Image (cartoon, helix red, strand yellow):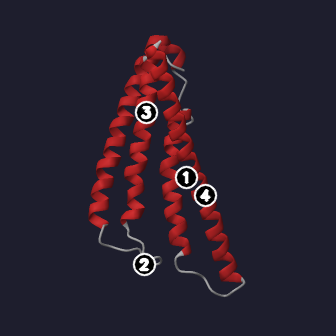
Amino acid sequence: MENQEKKTVLGCLIEGFYHVIQWICMLCLAGQVLIISYAVIGRFILNHSPAWAEEISRILMVWMSLLSAALAVKDKSHVRMTIFDKAFGKMGLKVREIIFVMINIAFCGVLFWKGIELIQQTHGTKLPGSGLPTSLLYGSVCIGGICMAIMLIYELGGVLCQRK
């Protein structure tokens, strides 16, 4: 019974984490729409185009892209080839899934490691339009890698424990 409670608590934590990421992605998308709308109105109606609009919108797009990859990992909505699934059998699919998850976790480790390097290299520079630190843009690589790794580890636990 205690093991079942841990799964439920862990599942609730992952669901909460998923919803936080989802809200951040929605805010990034809403921010992009508002900023680009403001830039278009400024350019064509007010004859003044803000220098920071495209830059901030790009930062929001990068953050949304990397964070939404973690959502796709949990939902299993990434593009997959399933043509050979019938040939593997049930045990073969489980082994393949474990191998793929481990490879993806290693990839997330590389994202985090290289993201840290990018942040260190760019911590002293500023983006030209907004004046924001360039490391803000590259911080998305680290955070996205961590979020994807968390979802992959949860998925690996599901595969190993036969959780759906």
Q: Residues within 10 Å of mark 2 (few under 14, many from 20)?
A: few
What residue type is disc 2 on?
Pro
**Residue position for label 1:** 24
Count of numbered marks? 4
Q: Residues within 10 Å of mark 1 (few under 14, many from 20)?
A: some
**Residue position for label 3:** 152
Res 50 quadrant in image: bottom right
Left or right of 39, for residue 140: left
What residue type is disc 1 on?
Ile
Asked whether disc 3 touches disc 4, contact meaning CB atoms under 8 Å apart, the reply is no
Real-space Cα separation, disc 1 to disc 2, in angstroms: 25 Å
Write the residue at 54% across / 45% down: 20
Q: Is residue 9 above or below residue 34?
A: above
Percent across and percent down for residue 16 are 53, 38
Q: Is residue 100 above or below residue 113?
A: above
Res 79 quadrant in image: top right
Q: Which mark is residue 128?
A: 2
Q: Earlier in the sequence, mark 1 or mark 4?
A: 1
- Can I make out residue 79 in this image? no
Write the residue at 54% across / 35% down: 15
Q: Mark 1 or mark 2: which is in front? A: 1
Q: Residues within 10 Å of mark 4 (few under 14, many from 20)?
A: some
Q: Which mark is residue 160?
A: none
Write the residue at 61% across / 57% down: 29
What residue type is disc 3 on?
Leu
**Residue position for label 4:** 29
Real-space Cα separation, disc 3 to disc 4, in angstroms: 24 Å
- In terms of secondary structure, where does tag 1 sit? helix
- In terms of secondary structure, where does tag 2 sit? loop
Real-space Cα separation, disc 3 to disc 2, in angstroms: 36 Å
As drawn, the residue found furthest toward the bottom would be 47
